[in-house]
Image (spheres, rainbow, N blue to C red):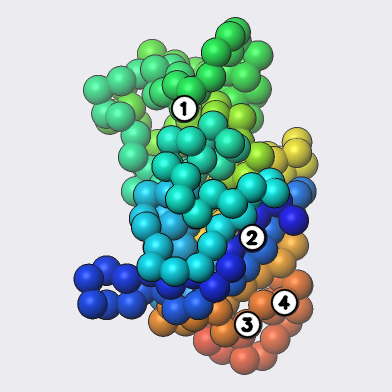
């Protein structure tokens, strides 16, 4: 198993955000974590990437216990994250933003840059444009491209469709599938549950800090209870 999260508990002061969360992601999969706002989805990703400490439990990645490993070393180990809100550097060009994703790597990056520009032709057209002047959809592409520049074994995507027009949402999910086809494992959290379940192999449902269900994504798409709770207007953009 490429990534194993084992019974993790996370607190913000006295508030417990994650309560015994366990999940696993096999190499080559797209796994999605769905749930309402405040369920703990972003906290889960931030804990995996090392941006948030945990109270108890463990995380294993590529056969190594990374529970106490600093976040920057997790990037080097092969965990890339495209954060909620995108986090684009506004005063840097698209090209410079992408290079920031490869800060821990040495050697010629031209092939990797070419691959990112192939995935995101819009970015190739706007290499010299400042990140802060890009549209929301373009900034999402920058954030995903920057994460890919670290050459991750697993790509953590936090709400990639948030705030995007429907046409762009479809494009972003198509690119996620292409990234996966090219060999990158993906752990996706997404409020647009229908889109997420359509591209994922497996899914977990998170409610108030607990995993309440896990199944093949196609099964959850067809589950009447899941449809009523997660696939209605409340979770769609």
Name the residue located 44 percent from the left edge and 57 percent from the top edge.
Answer: 47
Mark 2 and mark 1 lie on one chain; the one further toward the N terminus is: 2
The residue at which mark 1 appears reads as 101
| Mark toward the viewer: 2 or 4 | 2
Q: Secondary structure at mark 1?
A: loop
**Spatial separation of the CA atoms under disc 3 and disc 2:** 17 Å
Quarter holding the C terminus is bottom left
Mark 2 and mark 4 lie on one chain; the one further toward the N terminus is: 2
**Left or right: 198 in relation to 113:** right
The residue at which mark 3 appears reads as 213
Name the residue located 34 percent from the left edge and 34 percent from the top edge.
Answer: 88
Q: Is residue 98 visible?
A: no
Mark 3 and mark 1 lie on one chain; the one further toward the N terminus is: 1
Along the viewing direction, whichever of 53 and 214 lies nearer the viewer: 53
Q: Secondary structure at mark 4?
A: strand
**Spatial separation of the CA atoms under disc 3 and disc 1:** 34 Å
The residue at which mark 4 appears reads as 215
* Residues packed near mark 3 inside 10 Å, few (<14), some (14 to 19) or many (20 plus): few
* Residues packed near mark 4 inside 10 Å, few (<14), some (14 to 19) or many (20 plus): few
């Amino acid at each position: 198993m490429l990534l194993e999260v084992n019974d993790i508990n996370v607190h913000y002061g006295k508030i417990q955000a994650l309560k015994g969360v366990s999940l696993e992601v096999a190499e080559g999969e797209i796994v999605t974590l769905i749930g309402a706002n405040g369920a703990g989805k972003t906290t889960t990703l931030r804990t995996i990437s090392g941006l948030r400490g945990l109270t108890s439990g463990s995380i294993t990645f590529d056969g190594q216990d990374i529970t106490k490993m600093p976040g920057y070393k997790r990037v080097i180990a092969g965990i890339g994250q495209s954060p909620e809100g995108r986090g684009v550097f506004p005063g840097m060009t698209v090209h410079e933003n992408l290079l920031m994703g490869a800060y821990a790597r040495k050697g010629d990056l031209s092939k990797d840059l070419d691959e990112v520009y192939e995935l995101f032709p819009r970015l190739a057209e706007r290499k010299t444009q400042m990140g802060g002047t890009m549209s929301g959809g373009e900034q999402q592409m920058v954030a995903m491209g920057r994460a890919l520049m670290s050459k991750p074994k697993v790509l953590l995507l936090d709400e990639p469709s948030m705030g995007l027009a429907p046409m762009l949402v479809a494009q972003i999910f198509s690119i996620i599938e292409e990234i996966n086809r090219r060999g990158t494992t993906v752990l996706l959290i997404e409020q647009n549950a229908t889109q997420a379940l359509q591209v994922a192999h497996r899914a977990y449902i998170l409610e108030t800090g607990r995993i309440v269900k896990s199944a093949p994504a196609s099964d959850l798409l067809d589950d009447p209870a899941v449809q009523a709770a997660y696939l209605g207007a409340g979770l769609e953009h």
